Amino acid sequence: MGARLPACAVVRYTDGMATSAVRAGSLLRRVFAPLRVPVAFRLWDGSTVTAGAAGVPAFTVVLPRRRVLRRLLLRPTPLAFGTAWIDGGLDLEGDLFAAMTAGQDLEGLRPSLVLRAAALLEAVRP
């Protein structure tokens, strides 16, 4: 019997979920696992990945293009998220205050060297 993922690591696969979205979902769960609030990411192919604390996410980060995710994984900071939002590279749906709490958590987020290397690899893959 396979291991079950915790509720905070659920990926809703769609029939046509791209390999790049599967890899991205795995990285998102690992990079954003330390967040104190649950957060959902909707990827460019429509799939949804949940990361952070267990529970139902109060907001969703919508990533319509893969290249935005690349920038966020390489430098997961509030500034990177804010810049992407201002540039139209991402959208937020749901509770903005919960999103700001997650933003505060991003200040102390320090992905390991292994995670940063994986993000860099994802950034250069087609």
Image (cartoon, rainbow, N blue to C red):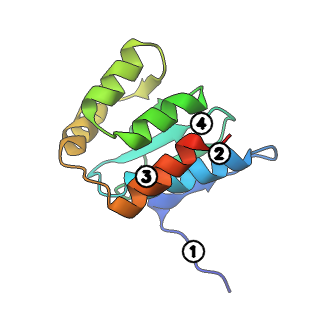
Q: Is residue 62 visible?
A: no
Left or right: residue 114 versus residue 107 is: right
Residue highlighted by disc 1: 4
The residue pinned by badge 2 equals: 21
What amino acid type is highlighted by mark number 2? Ala
Q: Which of the two discs, 1 and 2, sits closer to the camera?
A: 2
**Badge 2 element:** helix
Q: Is residue 72 above or below residue 86?
A: below
Disc 3, SS: strand
Check residue 51 in the rendering and tell me which mark sits there, or answer none.
Answer: 3
Q: Split into 4 quadrants, where in the image is the N terminus?
A: bottom right
In the image, what residue type sits under mark 1? Arg
Q: Nearer the viewer, residue 114 or 107?
A: 114
Would you say 68 lies left or right of 114 here?
A: right
Q: Which of pointers 1 and 4 lies earlier in the amino acid sequence?
A: 1
Percent across and percent down for residue 12 are 64, 50
Q: Mark on residue 43?
A: 4
- Whichever of labels 3 and 1 marks the residue nearer the N terminus, that label is 1
The first of marks 2 and 3 along the sequence is: 2
Find out whether the residues at labels 1 and 2 contact each other: C-beta distance under 8 Å: no
Q: Residues within 10 Å of mark 4 (few under 14, many from 20)?
A: many
**Alpha-carbon span between mark 1 and mark 4:** 22 Å
Picture quarter with the C terminus: top right
Q: Earlier in the sequence, mark 1 or mark 2?
A: 1
